[in-house]
Amino acid sequence: MKVVVLAGGLGTRISEESYLKPKPMITIGEQPILWHIMKYYSSFGFHDFVICCGYKGYMIKEYFADYYLHRSDVTFDFSAENRMTVHQNVAEPWRVTLVDTGLNTQTGARIKRVQKYIGDEPFMLTYGDGVSDVDLNALLKQHQASGKTVTLTGIQPGGRFGVLDLEGQAVVGFREKAKEDGGWINGGFMAAEPGLFDYLSAEEACILERDPLETLAREGKLGIYKHSGFWQCMDTQRDRSQLEAIWSNGNPPWVRSEIQ
C-alpha cells in the first residue's frame, strides 16, 4: 500500500527555517522530519511513498538522490582508476516517487495530481510536518472494516495557554489545558479509498480539509480513528524546539523499537 505525503506547502509559520528549505526538510536530530515520518511508516511495513512536492521541492529530490551516498561510508580513488567504493552501505526498503505538484497548490489538488501514481488502490495519507505514535495497523483495520472513504486520525491537543479556574470574579486556580478539555482535530495519518479522488479537483485552489472532507462528512463517508497517545506537528519554531528536546532526551515516542 502506498503512502502519500503532503510536502509542498510554504511553511510560513516557521519562516525562520522554511525560507531556506521546505518544512518537511527541517531537521529533528540532524534528520528531516520527513525522514522520521517515513521511518515510522516503514516500521509498520509501508515502504512505497509518493511525496507531493512544491515549495523548494528540488531540495527533497536532491536529498533522496544523494541519500545512498550520504548514509554510507565511501572511498574515492582519484588515481588512474577514478573509482568510488561504497562501504557498509545503509539501504532503506523504500520506493520513493517525488512529484512536483505546484508551488501554490492546495492540499486537495496536490493529492489529485498524484492520482496516476496511486491507481485504483487504497492508500495511506499524511502531512509532512507531524509525528505520532499512532497504531497504523489499528487505523487501517478500523478503516477497512468501516466502509468509509476516508478515516482520519483524531487527536486532542493540549492547549498552549493556561486555563483559569474561576469562582465569580476570583481566580482560584491556574492549570494547563488538558487534552480532554478540547475537541478532536484532524491529526493526519489517514487511510483512504481511491473514491476520494472523485471529491478532489486538480485545480490549484482545492483544499482537502474544506469541501472534500466536509462533503464526505455530510454523506457519512468520513471516519475517525481516535488516538490518545503522542502527536506533535512542527508548525512553529517552538514546536521544532520541543521535538528536538524530546529527541535529545532519548526514546522519542515516534521511534519504534523495530527501527531504533
Image (tube, grey):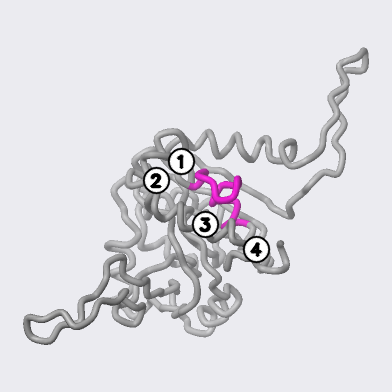
Reply yes or no: does residue 33 show up in magenta: yes
For mark 3, what is the residue?
Answer: 245
- At label 4, counting other C-alpha atoms closer than 10 Å, the crowd grade (few under 14, some 14-19, many 20 or more) is some
Q: Which residue is mark 2?
A: 9
Labels 2 and 1 touching (C-beta < 8 A):
yes
Q: Amino acid at mark 4?
A: Phe
Residue at point 32% right, 74% down?
A: 176
Distance from Cα at disc 2 to Cα at disc 3: 25 Å
Image quadrant where one finds the N terminus: bottom right
Distance from the alpha carbon under mark 4 to that under mark 3:
27 Å
Q: Position of residue 51 (x, y in %)?
A: 53, 49
Q: Residue 46 bears which disc, if any?
A: 4
Query: How far is disc 1 from disc 3 in space, using C-alphas?
Result: 21 Å
The quarter of the image holding the C terminus is bottom right
Measure the alpha-carbon separation of dots 4 and 2.
Answer: 23 Å
Q: Position of residue 204 (x, y in %)?
A: 32, 45
**In the displayed structure, does residue 78 sit left or right of residue 188?**
right
Q: Residues within 10 Å of mark 1 (few under 14, many from 20)?
A: many
Considering only order in the chain, which callout, 2 or 4, is on the residue closer to the N terminus? 2
Amino acid type at circle 2 is Gly
Residue drawn 73% across and 67% down?
A: 258
In the image, which is nearer the foreground, mark 2 or mark 3?
Answer: 3
Q: Residue furthest left?
A: 169
